[in-house]
Every structure is written in structure tokens, then in C-alpha cells.
Image (cartoon, rainbow, N blue to C red):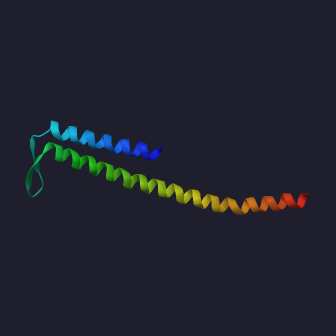
Amino acid sequence: MFKVLKIILVVLCLFCAFLLGSQNPQLVQINYIIASNTLPLAVIISICFILGVTIGCFISFKLFSKLKWQNYRLKKQLAPEKNNSKLIANKDT
């Protein structure tokens, strides 16, 4: 099910990119610090979108990896406590 949703999302994004590209054929001048360039508006929108998604993925990866590491440490810390409580319960019986 997740795979189907993923494919639908990719196709939807490609369709939106096609619509943006076909509706924005105007040329836009980009001024850099040392140079300037003229590009179609659809290319600029695509570059900004891809850059935003990439930055978002990096930030999310950093946050999720930090949380996974914290979860791993807490599970590792909890494991000896579970073993000790099982030993205490076995001694009582």
C-alpha cells in the first residue's frame, strides 16, 4: 500500500512540474554577485523546489537520527533494569 502511495505521489509531482513548466515559459534574469544569467522561470522554480526538499531532508535526517540515537540509549539503559526486576520477581516466588 505504501509503495502505491509513493508512486502516486511521484507521478503527481511530475505532473505538477510539467504544468509549471508549460505555464511559465518566460525568461528571467538572475543576478549573481559576479555574473548574471537568463533562465526560464520554470527552471528557477524547479531548482528552488529541489533545493528546499534537499535542505528539508537533511534537517529531518539530522533530527530523526538524533531521536533514534536517544531511543537506542534509553532502551539500552532500560534493558538491565528489566533483567533485574525479573530476577527479583523470580527470587520472591
Residue furthest out toward the top: 23
Residue furthest out toward the right: 93
Q: With 43 as the anchor, is 3 left or right in this view?
A: right
Give coordinates of residue 34: x percent, y percent: 9, 58
The answer to whether 10 is drawn above or below residue 85 in the figure is: above
Q: Tell me where residue 4 sits by quadrant.
A: top left
Give coordinates of residue 66: x percent, y percent: 49, 57
Q: Residue at x 86, y 60 (%)?
A: 90
Q: Residue at x 16, y 36 (%)?
A: 23
The residue closer to the viewer here, 71 or 2, is 2
The answer to whether 23 is drawn above or below residue 44 in the figure is: above
Give coordinates of residue 54: x percent, y percent: 32, 53
Q: Tell me where residue 35 sits by quadrant.
A: bottom left
Q: Residue at x 39, y 53 (%)?
A: 59
Q: With 63 as the anchor, is 78 left or right in this view?
A: right
The answer to whether 81 is drawn above or below residue 53 in the figure is: below
Q: How many badges with numbers are in the image?
A: 0
Q: With 42 as the anchor, is 7 left or right in this view?
A: right
Q: Residue at x 8, y 52 (%)?
A: 37
The residue closer to the viewer here, 3 or 91, is 3
Name the image quarter holding the C terminus. Answer: bottom right
